[in-house]
Image (cartoon, rainbow, N blue to C red):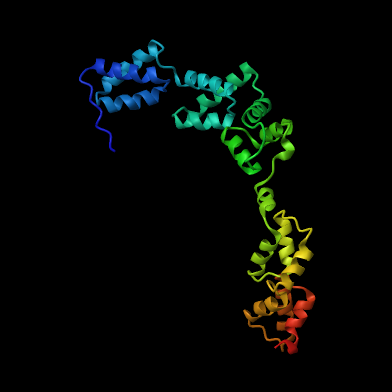
Amino acid sequence: MQRPPLKQAKSIDNVFNSAYWHLNQQDFTIGEIRTKLTRKTENVEWIETVLAHLIEHKYLKSDLEFAIRFCESAFSNDTGVSAIQRKLKKRGIASNDIETALEQVIDEEEVDFNEMASNRLQSRFMSFDGICREKLYAQMNTRGFSRAQIDYALSQHPEQDSLRSKMAIKADKAELSIEIIKLYRKGKGQTLIRNELKQRSIDISEFEETLYQLELAGDIDFYQSCKEQLAKKRYDLTDFKDKSKAYAYLSRKGFTSDEIKETLSPASD
């Protein structure tokens, strides 16, 4: 639903009242209040008079003072530098004021970002159930901490060894036979399947036995698959070079030497 138009100021008192009302809600920068007042009136003289009064009587802080108070509050809430920089820039504070404020508060309060990151991590995560390593790093980075600071915080966490990658969590849930069949249906041979499963951190300790059971059940047939993959190509097997290329192609697909030789032999046609 579209908001009704803001009632326009009929006097400078209306502009003052609007400014006071906004500042009673929260702290705003000079630029933010100016923007709000321009919606209340087109009278630039009224706006500048109100702003000058608010600044003179300390209702409005300078951008540097605002940035300093913002940094103090953010650090007390375990917020890192990059998040502070991002938020202050969004509120229209100039980069030099942001950096000056950061340097001053960091120096005065002797801020230890490693310790801050550690406090944040331990207060937010008693354990790492339900979260993977990638998501945790993303959350902490959004909070303003660098990777080195997050690494330190994690090294101090009593449950650090239980934090697992997204791939490892997914691998735990994977059923070996199903994953083998998925890759087999994509035309991959057993060597390539084994390597891909290993790269995905899936337990392959039962790989050979699982293959054997799948072959007995007729769910997979690598000799037949090898022939089907070759049929997709146009190699002339009577030509030595083409036959060598066919062998290399099937080998890259993960088929064994026996499967390839059987496929390339004239008797297999």
- Give the number of marks: 0
Among the 4 quarters of the image, the one containing residue 75: top right
Residue farthest to the left, as pictured: 10
Q: Nearer the viewer, residue 194 or 208?
A: 208
Q: Is residue 47 left or right of residue 71?
A: left
Q: Residue furthest top?
A: 57
User: Height in image: 126 above or below 176?
Assistant: above
Nearer to the camera, 209 or 179: 209
**Of residues 227 and 152, which is closer to you in this image?**
227
Q: Residue at x 34, y 27 (%)?
A: 35
Image coords of residue 191 (percent x, y) = 75, 67
Q: Considering only vertical position in the picture, is 53 above or below 128?
A: above
Question: Is 13 on the left-hand or right-hand side of 151?
Answer: left
* Residue in the image at 59% along x and 29% along y: 80
Q: Residue at 25%, 25% (x, y): give it.
A: 41
Relative to residue 23, is residue 91 depicted above or below? below
Which quarter of the rendered picture does the C terminus lie within?
bottom right
Question: Left or right: 257 with respect to 76?
Answer: right
- Front in this rendered view, residue 192 or 161: 161
Q: Residue furthest front?
A: 217
**Picture quadrant where residue 177 is located:** bottom right
* Quarter of the figure with the N terminus: top left
Q: Position of residue 175 (x, y in %)?
A: 68, 58
- Counting from the top left corner in percent of width and height, residue 17 is at 29, 16
Q: Residue at x 73, y 75 (%)?
A: 248
Q: Percent from the top left, x then y, of residue 165? A: 67, 46
